[in-house]
Amino acid sequence: MDNGLTHFNASGEAHMVDVGAKAVTQREAVAEGRIFMQPATLQLIVQGSHKKGDVLGIARVAGIMGAKRTADLVPLCHPILLTNVELELTTEPHQNAVHCRATVRCGGHTGVEMEALSAVQVALLTVYDMCKAVDRGMVMQGIGLVAKSGGKSGAWRREAAAG
């Protein structure tokens, strides 16, 4: 069964890819996403007056933890020794949103795309969790890989959306 999906063996069964023969290279992945909310919710975050504390600071730590725990959450991911996780959380008042950008690095046999995506998801989920008492209608959107480098396939960058 060769359909290009690497997490299935010749019999079509799910399996963990053997990365042992792959070269160790410096790898990096960048992912991003946004959570949209009511203007008053964003104001609580910006002013730091949310009764649960520093929403963005806690979300940043949660995103880092999410990257580190990806293999515990995604069944066929390899545990990876990460060398760096950077999370930027930026308020966007013109969109009533918080933008999250995660950059994850390692020197290893396999890429860190899943770790970058997990970091963004967990950070945005933490913003939701901390603010849901005042705004249950928040929506996460645009979560995706922006770029990756390293490994046999080399560099990749998502093309800018047309429009």
Image (cartoon, rainbow, N blue to C red):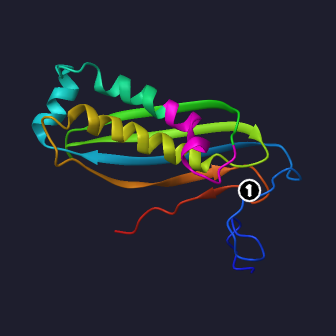
- Give the percent coordinates (x, y) of residue 45: 22, 28
Which range is magenta? 64-78
Judge from the rendering whether residue 149 lies leftward or rightward of residue 51; answer left or right: right
What residue is shown at x 40% (from left), y 40% (from top)? 100
Q: Is residue 54 above or below residue 107?
A: above
Q: Is mark 1 on a helix, strand or loop?
A: loop
Q: Quadrant of residue 44?
A: top left
According to the image, label 1 marks what residue?
Answer: 154
Please check the rendered image and state whether residue 71 is part of the magenta-colored stretch, yes or no: yes
What residue is shown at x 69% (from left), y 46% (from top)? 78
Q: Name the residue at the right extreme.
A: 21
- Give the percent coordinates (x, y) of residue 120: 44, 42
Total marks shown come to 1
Task: Out of 96 and 53, give the one closest to the viewer.
Answer: 53
Q: Which amino acid does label 1 sit on?
A: Gly
Judge from the rendering whether residue 106 lies leftward or rightward of residue 152; answer left or right: left
